[in-house]
């Protein structure tokens, strides 16, 4: 019986929300957030989208003609997927972790 009570108490502690989490942005983080927003805008903006389209087209052509290794082509495509899907990936991880 004591083990069940201990496990139930441990489960309650794990399932309980952490009250010490910061809800807003920390003081003084405005310049850092501005810099990170600039990096995000650069990585996901029109220039990056155009470069990704050109890279996919070029690699697809080179793979079609046998001048580019399939493994390296898949790595480039996965990298593009991760860069443009980063916002969705992080949102999914946060929702699984119980965040906002």
Image (spheres, rainbow, N blue to C red):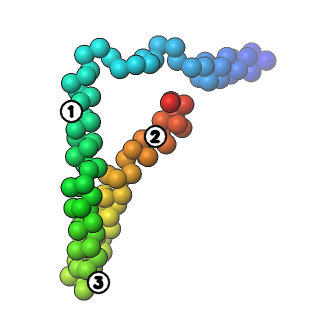
Q: Position of residue 85 (x, y in %)?
A: 39, 51
Report the side of 12 relative to 53 (left or right).
Answer: right
Residue 85 visible to the viewer: yes
Q: Residues within 10 Å of mark 2 (few under 14, many from 20)?
A: some
The label on residue 91 is 2
Report the side of 96 relative to 3 (left or right).
Answer: left
Do labels 1 and 3 touch, CB within 8 Å? no
The quadrant in which residue 23 appears is top left
What residue sits right under mark 3 in the picture? Answer: 64
The label nearer to you, 1 versus 2, is: 1
Point out the tag, 1 or 3, that comes first from the N-terminus: 1
CA gap between label 1 and label 3 equals: 40 Å
Q: Position of residue 64 (x, y in %)?
A: 29, 83
| Farthest-out residue, front | 46
Of the 4 image quadrants, the one containing the N terminus is: top right
Q: Position of residue 43 (x, y in %)?
A: 25, 48
- Label 2's element? helix
Give the residue displayed 27% in from the left and 58% down from the top.
49
Q: Position of residue 66 (x, y in %)?
A: 25, 84
| Farthest-out residue, right | 1
Q: Is residue 87 above or below residue 55?
A: above
The label on residue 99 is none
Report the side of 12 relative to 43 (left or right).
Answer: right
Point out the tag, 3 or 2, that comes first from the N-terminus: 3
- Label 1's element? helix
Give the residue displayed 30% in from the left and 57% down from the top.
79
Give the residue displayed 23% in from the left and 27% down from the top.
32
What residue sits right under mark 1 in the picture? Answer: 35
- Label 3's element? helix
CA gap between label 1 and label 2 equals: 20 Å
């Amino acid at each position: 019986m004591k083990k069940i009570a201990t496990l139930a108490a441990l489960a309650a502690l794990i399932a309980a929300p952490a009250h010490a989490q910061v809800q807003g942005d920390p003081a003084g983080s405005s310049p850092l957030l501005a810099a990170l927003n600039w990096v995000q805008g650069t990585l996901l903006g029109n220039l990056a989208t155009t470069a990704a389209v050109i890279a996919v087209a070029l690699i697809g052509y080179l793979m079609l003609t046998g001048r580019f290794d399939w493994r390296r082509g898949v790595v480039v495509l996965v990298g593009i997927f991760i860069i443009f899907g980063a916002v969705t990936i992080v949102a999914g991880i946060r929702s699984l972790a119980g965040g906002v």
